[in-house]
Image (spheres, grey):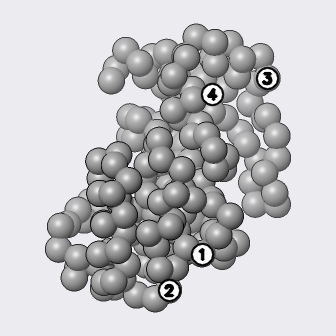
Amino acid sequence: LHRIHPTVDYSELSECQLVIEAVFEDLKVKAEVTRLAEAAMPASAIFASNTSTIRIAKLAEASVRPEQFIGLHFSSPVDRMPILEIIVSESTSRETLARSMDFSAAISKTPVRGEAARFINSWVRSRPTRQVKFLCTLSTCLRPFGAWFRYRHLGAQGACRHRVGPVMQQTQL
């Protein structure tokens, strides 16, 4: 946490290689933040959204460099959940995905590649009992996602080896 520097001064983004917005879940607000942040960021920087409900492709429409736009969604509670959900759009480059995977490793989070149309964390929390049963039935390795990583766990406690599963998470939030 000591390395996180929240700011409302966009000029402070001039040397950042990764910016993660975490503003209110409103398309217009997020689009404005994207435009202002990208104007201040280096050309090589990645812009990420921490959204949990808005499609990344829709958010990337506000970007002047959609190939460097990605979703990085942290599961709550962040300090206890080892997942970092990574969501790409059709325009997200492989380099942006690879750099995001490196970021996930650097902060000791397990990268889970989400689908563009569905956010894993929101899906799991929406109907916890049914999803926990389903996930634990399938166990920890559900399916491979390319050469970079495997889908190891989604947040179910026990068989899926998470400290806080969605049922417990519901009671803690």
- What amino acid is at disc 2? Ser
Instruction: Give the residue pinned by disc 3.
Output: 138
Location of residue 9 (image quadrant): bottom left
Find disc 4 in the rendering and name its residue.
Answer: 161
Q: Residue 96 shows which numbered tag?
A: none
- At label 3, the amino acid type is Leu
Dot 2 lies on which element?
loop
How many residues crowd mark 2 within 10 Å: few (<14), some (14–19), many (20+)? Answer: few
Q: CA distance from mark 3 to mark 1?
A: 33 Å
Q: CA distance from mark 2 to mark 4?
A: 36 Å
Q: Which mark is residue 44?
A: 2
Q: Position of residue 34 (x, y in %)?
A: 37, 69
**Going 34% across and 20% down the picture, which residue do you hit?**
172
User: Who comes first in sequence, dot 2 or dot 4?
Assistant: 2
Answer with left or right where residue 169 lies relative to residue 37: right
Query: Residue 132 versus residue 9: which sits nearer the camera?
Result: 9
Q: Nearer the viewer, mark 3 or mark 1?
A: 1
Task: Sort mark 1 into few (<14), some (14-19) or many (20+) by Cα contacts within 10 Å.
Answer: many
